[in-house]
Image (cartoon, rainbow, N blue to C red):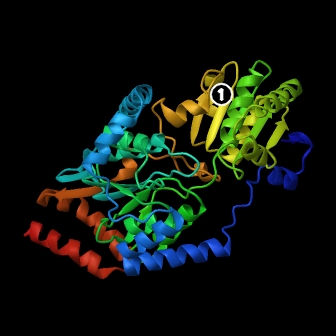
């Protein structure tokens, strides 16, 4: 990790220090994705079979996971993993249920009732990747809030293995959340199938979930196309920012940094501390842990674009963090909660020495589908409301139009919208008569 002294940097150098690794979508990637989307839109299931054979190494006659495969997954997943998935699902359900938005009604005037009602998005598509490893945790993070929202049609796509089956742990997690419509489809073709619909896969209104560069680009493109689908968040490489004081545990901090660095070579980790000895100790720990880390080369690639930054104070560190707006923020501080009011932009915050970011990834109860690339300045992570639409309702009695109608007439007159004014004025005349 590059070592920097924050207060010694000018503004341009500070901006450079907090710049994410370049995430420019290669023209070849964008063009390849465009071709895949067009092929699926044109040829439907036939395109999915051809693309599956090309990219996943298996040509499937049917994409949907049947009851027999679900039952086999139930038997194949080891008991300790089943128990872990069950425990994580229970915590995720409890946390998301507690935070659900509620409808409300307000009489904004005599005879004027305004409401906000909630309706589930009717058709949602969830993508669970299985690149270097399958991700049952992502299935939990997407399926549970979709079920709590009451979405009547939930489709989940996940890449097939070479034997033509879906990963058993992903299937177990999906079934645990009540999701049984699972398709063995991966990559940009899975996004296209859910966005446009085919004979086998129903068209979805909104798509959720992370993925590789092709999946990310496919989501971006379908969100812009007429007849495409909305998306949850622009997905980017994973990132964490850790603020550590002199009392932090260097081994814990190093492990937290590496847990994000091992995601991929384009991930980024940043360490801020007001104690130079802490920065030195963490650097030593990183080297020691890398020596035995199976994904060490991936982590090393990420560390080359990462930073270890000395600040003058923890208050300065919080200012730097807010400027960066990290996906994950760990406050490895002696009185971490006291600093929480200073946090203005972060996807998810982890307080103190005993809250590793990995708990949020798996089983604390919060969601790990979070804003990246600075989007935490204006967006939060996936939750039940992400799967709902809010509709406002107005009910007006004759006395209500008499009470607030003149207000609308005056505003319409000021804006020069006569039809608006007349629509209200006619009713006022009728009430007066």
Task: Give residue 204's position: percent from left, percent from top.
Answer: 34, 64
Which quadrant of the figure has residue 347?
A: top right
Residue at the image point whose x is 46% and y is 47% from the top: 382
Q: Residue 402 at what x, y percent from top left? A: 18, 61
Left-right relation of 223 to 399: right
Query: Vertically, is 367 above or below 219?
Result: above
The residue lying furthest to the front in this view is 163
Q: How many marks?
A: 1
In percent of width and height, residue 419 lies at 27, 80
Q: Residue at x 31, y 58 (%)?
A: 64
The C terminus appears in which quarter of the rendering? Answer: bottom left
Q: Position of residue 69 (x, y in %)?
A: 31, 47
Identity of the residue drawn at 61% across and 55% down: 236
Quadrant into which the N terminus falls: top right
Specify the quadrant of the image occupied by residue 177: top left
**Helix, strand or loop status at disc 1:** helix
Q: Nearer the viewer, residue 68 or 98?
A: 68
In the rendered view, does 431 fall on the left or right side of 220? left
Q: Residue furthest left?
A: 433
Relative depth, front residue between 298 and 359: 298
Q: Is residue 102 left or right of residue 87?
A: left
Whether residue 383 is visible, yes or no, is: no
Residue 26 left/right relative to 389: right
Of the pair 32 and 115, the residue shown nearer to us: 32
Note whether 24 is above or below 92 in the view shown: below
Identify residue for label 1: 339
Determine the residue located farthest toward the right in the rendered image. Answer: 8
The answer to which image quadrant residue 160 occupies is bottom left
Query: Can residue 121 be seen in this snapshot?
Result: yes
Binning the other alpha carbons within 10 Å of mark 1 as few (below 14), some (14 to 19) or many (20 upward) gives some
């Amino acid at each position: 990790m590059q070592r920097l002294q924050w207060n010694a940097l000018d503004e341009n150098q500070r901006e450079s220090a907090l710049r994410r690794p370049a995430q420019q979508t290669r023209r070849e990637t964008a063009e390849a994705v465009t071709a895949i989307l067009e092929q699926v839109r044109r040829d439907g299931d036939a395109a999915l079979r051809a693309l599956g054979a090309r990219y996943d190494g298996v040509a499937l006659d049917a994409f949907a996971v049947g009851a027999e495969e679900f039952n086999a997954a139930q038997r194949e997943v080891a008991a300790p993993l089943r128990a872990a998935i069950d425990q994580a699902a229970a915590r995720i359900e409890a946390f998301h249920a507690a935070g659900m938005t509620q409808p409300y009604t307000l009489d904004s005037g005599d005879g004027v009732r305004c409401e906000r009602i909630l309706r589930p998005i009717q058709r949602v598509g969830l993508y669970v990747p299985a690149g270097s490893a399958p991700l049952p945790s992502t299935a939990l993070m997407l399926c549970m809030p979709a079920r709590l929202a009451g979405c009547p049609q939930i489709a989940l796509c996940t890449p097939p293995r070479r034997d033509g089956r879906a990963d058993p742990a992903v299937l177990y997690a999906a079934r645990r959340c009540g999701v049984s419509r699972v398709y063995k489809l991966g990559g940009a073709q899975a996004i296209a199938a859910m966005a446009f619909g085919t004979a086998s896969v129903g068209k979805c209104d909104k798509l959720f979930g992370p993925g590789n560069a092709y999946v990310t680009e496919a989501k971006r493109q379908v969100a812009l196309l007429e007849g495409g689908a909305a998306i949850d968040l622009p997905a980017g490489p994973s990132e964490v920012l850790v603020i550590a004081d002199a009392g932090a545990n260097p081994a814990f901090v190093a492990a937290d940094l590496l847990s994000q660095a091992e995601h991929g070579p384009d991930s980024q980790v940043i360490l801020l501390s007001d104690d130079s000895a802490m920065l030195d100790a963490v650097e030593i720990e990183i080297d020691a842990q890398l020596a035995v880390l199976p994904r060490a080369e991936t982590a090393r690639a990420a560390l080359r674009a990462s930073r270890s930054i000395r600040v003058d104070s923890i208050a300065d560190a919080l200012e730097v963090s807010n400027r960066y707006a990290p996906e994950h923020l760990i406050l490895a501080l002696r009185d971490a909660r006291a600093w929480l009011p200073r946090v203005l932009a972060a996807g998810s915050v982890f307080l103190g020495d005993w809250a590793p970011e990995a708990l949020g990834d798996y089983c604390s109860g919060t969601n790990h589908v979070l804003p990246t690339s600075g989007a935490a300045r204006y967006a939060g992570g996936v939750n039940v409301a992400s799967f709902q639409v809010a509709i406002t309702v107005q009910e007006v009695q004759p006395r209500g139009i008499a009470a607030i109608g003149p207000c609308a007439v005056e505003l319409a007159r000021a804006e020069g919208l006569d039809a608006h004014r007349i629509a209200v004025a006619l009713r006022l005349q009728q009430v007066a008569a």
